[in-house]
Amino acid sequence: MTIDRRRLLTGAVAAPLALGLRPAWGLGSPRVFVSACGDAAGRFSVRAVAADGRLLFDLALPGRGHAATRRPGHNEVVVVARRPGRFMLAIDPLTGDVAGQIEAAPGRHFYGHAAFSPDGRWLFVAENAYAEGRGVIGVYDAVAGYRRSRELPSHGIGPHELAMLSDGRRLVVANGGIRTHPESGRRKLNLETMRPSLAYVDAANGALLQRFTLPGELHRLSIRHMAVTADDQVCLALQNEGPRDRLVPLAGRQRGEAPIALMPGPEDVLRRMRHYTGGAALDDGGLVLAVSAPRGGLVSFWLPQEGRWLGSLAVPDGCGLAGAGGAGRFAVSSGAGRLLLHDAFSGRSETLRDDGRSGLAWDNHLLAV
C-alpha cells in the first residue's frame, strides 16, 4: 500500500488546549508524544503532539499501528503494526518524514512491539512464526536500511512487549502464551494450555538465560506489557484469560533471580480493571508505575519498589502511557481522543488535547521522545 506522505502541519490544526503547560508542569526539556491512532472514517495514522499541545504531524499508515520505539542517538522512531500486521515505519518524530518502510518476513507477522540496541543499530521485533506456533524475535540492521539480519527464539508463544536491559546484551521478553494465526483473525487458539513466561534472552545468539513463569493455577494470566527501571527491575502488566469470577492481580514485578511477584491492590480497583490491562509505563525516575485498563476506564499507579498500589485515575478508554517529566507525572491517551497529563502524587490532571469530537481514537501506546 502506498503511504500518504501528506501531513497536517501545525498551521492547520486546532489551537492548543493547555497554554503555559511547560511552566506549570516543569518539563525539564521539550518533548514530543508519538502514538498511532485511528478515526471514524477507518483511516489509520501516526501523530506527534508537542508539549504545548500542538499537533506536529498526522501521517497515514498502511494499517493499524500499535507501539513506537525510539532509536537511540538518532532523531528517528519506528512504529510497529498491530497483530497480525506486517509493516513497520521508520519516521522523524518531529516532522513525520519517512525514513523507510519494513515488511515482515514470509511466514511472520509483528506483535506491535520492538526495542533497539543501545547504539541504535539493531532493532529487535516481537514476531509470530505462525505456522509453527512459536514466538521469534526478528533482528533488523538499522544501518543497512532495516535489513532483516537474523532471527532469535523468544522461548515462548505469543511474545508481545520486549525490552533491552541496561547491559545492552540481554533482552527481556513478555511471552504472553497465547497462540494465534492470521487465518483465524484475533481468535485465541490455546487458552486451556497456554503457558506465559518472562524470558531473558542473549541478544547476540538467542540463548535462554532465565525464564520465569507463574504458578500453575495462574497459567491463564498472560504476561503482556512491561516497563523496566534503569537498574533492571521489570514491571509487568497482565491480562487474565481465566475464569471471570476470580479477581487476580494484574500488575507485577521481577528482578534478578527472584520469582515474579504480583502486586495486590484494592478489590474495587481490580474489579474495575475488568481482567485486562493495555499498557505499562514508568515515570521518568522509575519511581511510579502506571498500568492502564482501558476496558474499565481506569489507570492505576503503583510503587514497584514497595509492591503496593498508590492510586487510580478514571479515564474512559484510557490506554496509552508515557512518563511526562518529574516523579509521578504521566501522559495518558485514550480511545476517546483525549491526551492529558496527570500527577499521580497530587492527583492533578490537565488536558493537553481533546480530539474526541473529530472521531479520533488514540491507539494503545504512547511514546515520549
Image (tube, helix red, strand yellow):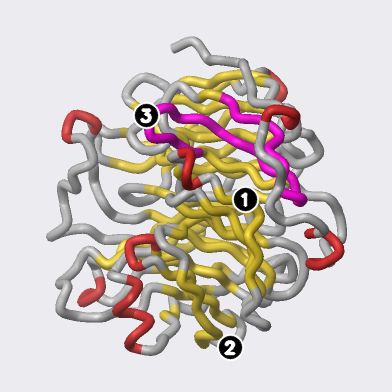
Is residue 206 shown to the viewer in this render? no
Q: Is residue 44 magenta?
A: yes
Q: Main secondary structure of the magenta part?
A: strand
Secondary structure under the numbered disc 1 in the rendered image: strand
Tell me which amino acid carries mark 3.
Gly
Question: Tag on residue 306?
Answer: 2
Secondary structure under the numbered disc 2 in the rendered image: loop
Question: Tag on residue 42?
Answer: 3
Please name the residue shown 63% across and 48% down the image. 367
Q: Is residue 54 magenta?
A: yes
Residue 85 picture location, percent across and down: 38, 30
First in residue order: circle 1 vs circle 3: 3
Range shown magenta: 37-59
Tell me which amino acid carries mark 1.
Arg
Residue 100 image-quadrant placement = top right
Please name the residue shown 32% across and 60% down the image. 196
Residue named by callout 1? 353
Q: Nearer the viewer, residue 354 or 124?
A: 354
Q: CA distance from mark 1 to mark 2?
A: 33 Å
Q: CA distance from mark 1 to mark 3?
A: 21 Å
The nearer-to-camera label among 1 and 2 is 1
- Are there few (<14), some (14-19), or many (20+) residues within 10 Å of tag 1? many
- Total labels drawn: 3
Is residue 52 shown to the viewer in this render? yes
Q: From the viewer's perspective, is residue 76 above or below residue 162?
A: above
Q: CA distance from mark 3 to mark 2?
A: 43 Å
Q: Quadrant of the N terminus?
A: top left
